[in-house]
């Protein structure tokens, strides 16, 4: 599995990353119903991912117990993983609540550090609710992440946007973006390429259109200029291996 530089941050991540939403949340996700994995199953998934060369895990406070479970599962192995999480969104089991104030972002990151059992986070993304431009222009969320970066608690800052315009604007404010890109959905392709040219990292979400696109399409996504890593959300080690092979990294 190749490792690619996350823009100009000095961080290197695997070309395929593991999206960890399904480790802690089964409610209100746009996927087929599933059961949360047991601790043993979750450990098996992480072991399989590591054996396949995956070193990047992406989680979020909005993913239920995902951060807490990862904090337990990665005990003693923190140095082997690049941890990406988010701030700005909380999920109460039924609906999401968003707060992009300086205080809320700071408190969210501090809570993530405790749950993940670590004294630093490699990447923290602002978890946008879709009002990308307003969040960025208001500025408190990015300012909070910048302060945490200066304090050494966050190594790289990011923005998980919902609009192409938001993605373009975020390039002037953050170290990385999280973009939606698949072979069928290409409206953010220009954002991804612009990010690469600007020295920003790009993590790709929804590369399989929530399971609609064929695994073979991952190869197209992974080789697009600007793409740093493609996130795959699964709790099945067999599926992860097959998707990595389909992406051309077996």
Image (cartoon, rainbow, N blue to C red):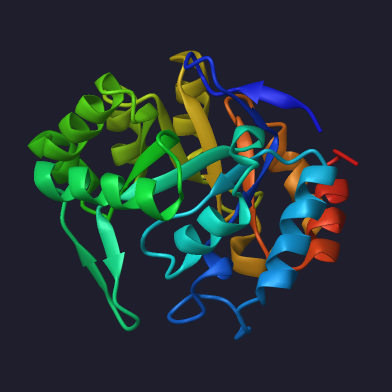
Q: State which quarter of the image contains the N terminus.
A: top right
**Residue at the image position 71 percent from the left and 26 percent from the top:** 3
Q: Where is residue 191 in the image (x, y as percent from the top left)?
A: 44, 32
Q: Closest to the observer: 60 or 222?
A: 60
User: How many callouts does the rendering have?
Assistant: 0
Q: 85 above or below 28?
A: above
Specify the quadrant of the image occupied by residue 229. top right
Q: Nearer the viewer, residue 30 or 20?
A: 20
At which x and y percent is residue 120? Answer: 41, 33
The residue at 54%/23% (across/down) is: 6
Image quadrant where residue 73 sits: bottom right
Q: In this view, does 197 lie to the left or right of 148?
A: right
- Rendered residue at 20%/52% (across/down): 131
Which x, y percent locates residue 26?
51, 79
Q: Residue 8: horizontal and vertical position, in percent?
A: 48, 13
Whether residue 239 appears in this view of the structure is yes
The quarter of the picture where the C terminus appears is top right
* Of 201 and 221, the residue lying toward us: 201
């Amino acid at each position: 599995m190749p490792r690619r530089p996350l823009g100009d941050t000095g961080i290197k991540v695997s070309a395929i990353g593991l999206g960890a939403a399904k480790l802690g949340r089964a409610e209100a996700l746009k996927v087929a119903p599933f059961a949360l994995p047991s601790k043993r199953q979750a450990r098996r998934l992480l072991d399989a991912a590591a054996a396949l060369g995956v070193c990047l895990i992406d989680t979020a406070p909005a993913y239920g117990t995902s951060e807490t479970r990862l904090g337990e599962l990665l005990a003693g192995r923190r140095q082997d993983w690049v941890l990406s999480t988010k701030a700005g969104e909380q999920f109460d089991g039924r609906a999401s609540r968003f707060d992009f104030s300086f205080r809320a972002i700071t408190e969210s990151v501090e809570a993530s550090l405790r749950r993940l059992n670590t004294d630093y986070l490699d990447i923290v993304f602002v978890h946008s609710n879709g009002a990308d431009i307003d969040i960025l222009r208001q500025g408190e969320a990015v300012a909070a992440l910048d302060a945490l970066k200066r304090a050494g608690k966050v190594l790289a800052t990011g923005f998980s946007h919902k609009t192409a315009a938001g993605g373009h604007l975020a390039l002037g404010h953050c170290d990385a973006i999280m973009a939606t890109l698949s072979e069928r959905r290409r409206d953010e392709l220009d954002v991804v390429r612009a990010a690469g040219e600007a020295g920003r990292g790009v993590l790709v979400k929804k590369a399989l259109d929530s399971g609609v696109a064929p695994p073979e399409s991952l190869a197209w996504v992974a080789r697009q200029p600007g793409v740093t890593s493609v996130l795959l959300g699964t709790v099945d080690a067999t599926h992860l291996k097959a998707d990595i092979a389909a992406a051309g990294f077996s």
